[in-house]
Image: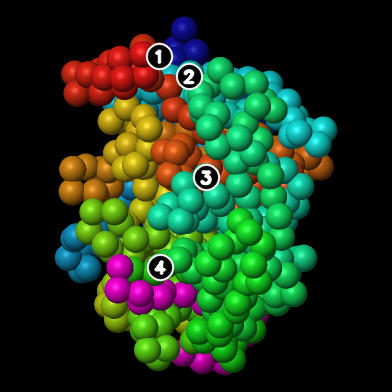
Amino acid sequence: MRGVIEFLLYMLLLWGAALLLFGVKTFSFDSPLLLFVLMLGVGFALALIGKRWGRGMLLLAIPMAVLLAHFTAERLWPPPEEGNRARVYRLTPELNADPATLPSEHNSSLGSDNDRREAPDFGVQSRNLSLECADGRASTGEITLLTGMDIHPIVCGLKGIEDIVFPAEADPEVMYASLPDSGMVYRVERENPSSASSAADKPRSDMWRKNIFYSGLDRPMGLEWYAGSLYVATRTEVLKLTNPASATGQEVTAETVVSDLPPAIATEHRSLAIDADGTIYLSMGAGDAEPQELNWQRAAVLRITPAGEVELFAAGLHHARALVLHPQTGALWALEDSPETLDLDSPPDEINVIKQGGDYGWPFCYGFRVPDKDLGTKTICTTTDAPVAFLPPHSSPAGLAFGANLDAPARYQSMLYVALKGRVYDAQGRGFRIVGLPLDEQGDLTGWGVDVVSSGATPTKLYAQPTALAVAPDRNLYLADAYSGMVYRFMFPFDVDLKPASAKEDNSAAEHKNGKE
């Protein structure tokens, strides 16, 4: 009996040391001294077992301890991706902290299992969907949706679609779409404007028709609508396209707003946002130049005044995407697609609020003011602007939309929606997803989020490649998918009994239902 107790105690020591090794990256305590102490603990436990019971017992003790430590670590610190289950994202709690107290390394963006149990349970369901367009094209795959959510494509045949925009004041049932590879911008409109948009629609009953609006462009990317004109970011320019009567087929006129920009590389996306006074904000990626070779127009957000002057608005952004103005504060929000130069676990992708004169760190810092091992220092990084949220590394964020105008219960209106492309180049196959991040009454992130839509992938099979999100005048959420060439419409549930639900949300759902009746 004494021998059994001794063996269990030695195994406990070995298990504890192995568990701490599994948790090193999670807690970012990967200093050489700590690793030495942990390895010393493993060696001490192995020496005790070998001395007491011989080398043969090590063949049993080592795999048992490692397996137990692995399963325990999986339970305590869930991996960034876990198939199609709804994930809960923990946002940066130290945003307004004194820089001197900030963590020296980036911690995981995911909460523990206890955190997950505290997060709202919105309910999800997996469904095998065959999404078919009117021309017979189909996209089939298993995706996970919020319970009661409806999805179907409204247009197809737009392979490589990059951005979408809805000109509400011109025509609430018109959408523009950019296709960089073909050099075209399409005008897409509902075939039957009088048809109601409901979840009971048949797949082909609400299809939109598309026509070429403008062609011959040099990689049209970001789109924005302002004062009756469509603004387009191309490889080296920003153009203003105007057609006072597009439905009658009159010729579109093109006016150059800005030219001679540093050429965008093949993997770069340039986003546009325009505020109420006509000021244009343009994202400029780092391109493929070395950091020391960058000019002031790279790795930045530029501001273009109504007079056509180009100014530096913010710097230190490796590849800002999806510029969106906050519906309440007017602040400029953006996604940050961080470089894939460190490892599979860093740097994290980010959500940033872009401030005038802001410096967001790249190439000297990443994550939460973590110095780059070759270029950065803590002195430099403590002066940079921190992100408002982390996203999983290499998740390739592409689309951003506020839900304030959604035709949905209050719980969904008070969310920020982020489309992630995911990745498929590793064995686990990280698929695409749309993440909903709750906002408070002031429009600030509250700290938790859930997968609204998600799908797995494999190294040889990709189900979707999201490139843009938008809330349309019909108050539904639209997603552009470059892989299938489709644009999908998502409609949120009203009549599904989800928990926890506030009285305000329940009343909102009831009022909506009664209004439709």
Task: Give the label, 3 or 2, closer to the camera.
Answer: 3
Which is nearer the N-term, disc 4 or disc 2?
Answer: 2
- Kind of element beneath mark 1: loop
Looking at the rendered image, the quarter that the C terminus falls into is top left
> Where is mark 3, residue-wise?
173
Which label belongs to residue 147?
2
**Up-down relation of residue 469 to residue 287 (above or below):** above
Mark 4, other Cα within 10 Å: few <14 / some 14–19 / many ≥20: few
The answer to whether the residues at label 1 and label 2 have Cβ atoms under 8 Å apart is yes
Residue at mark 1 to residue at mark 2: CA–CA distance? 7 Å
Residue at mark 3 to residue at mark 1: CA–CA distance? 28 Å
Q: Is residue 292 magenta?
A: yes
**Which residue is found at the position 46% from the left and 56% from the top?**
170
**Which residue is found at the position 25% from the left and 23% from the top?**
508
Segment tinted magenta in the rendering: 276-296
**Which residue is found at the position 71% from the left and 55% from the top?**
211
Residue 154 % position (x, y): 63, 38
Q: Is residue 418 magenta?
A: no
| Kind of residue indicated by mark 2 | Thr
Residue at mark 3 to residue at mark 2: CA–CA distance? 27 Å
> Where is mark 4, residue-wise?
227
- Kind of element beneath mark 4: loop
Which label belongs to residue 496?
1
Which is nearer the N-term, disc 3 or disc 2?
Answer: 2
**Which residue is found at the position 52% from the left and 45% from the top?**
173
**Up-down relation of residue 413 to residue 218 (above or below):** above
- Kind of element beneath mark 2: loop
| Kind of residue indicated by mark 1 | Val
| Kind of residue indicated by mark 4 | Ala
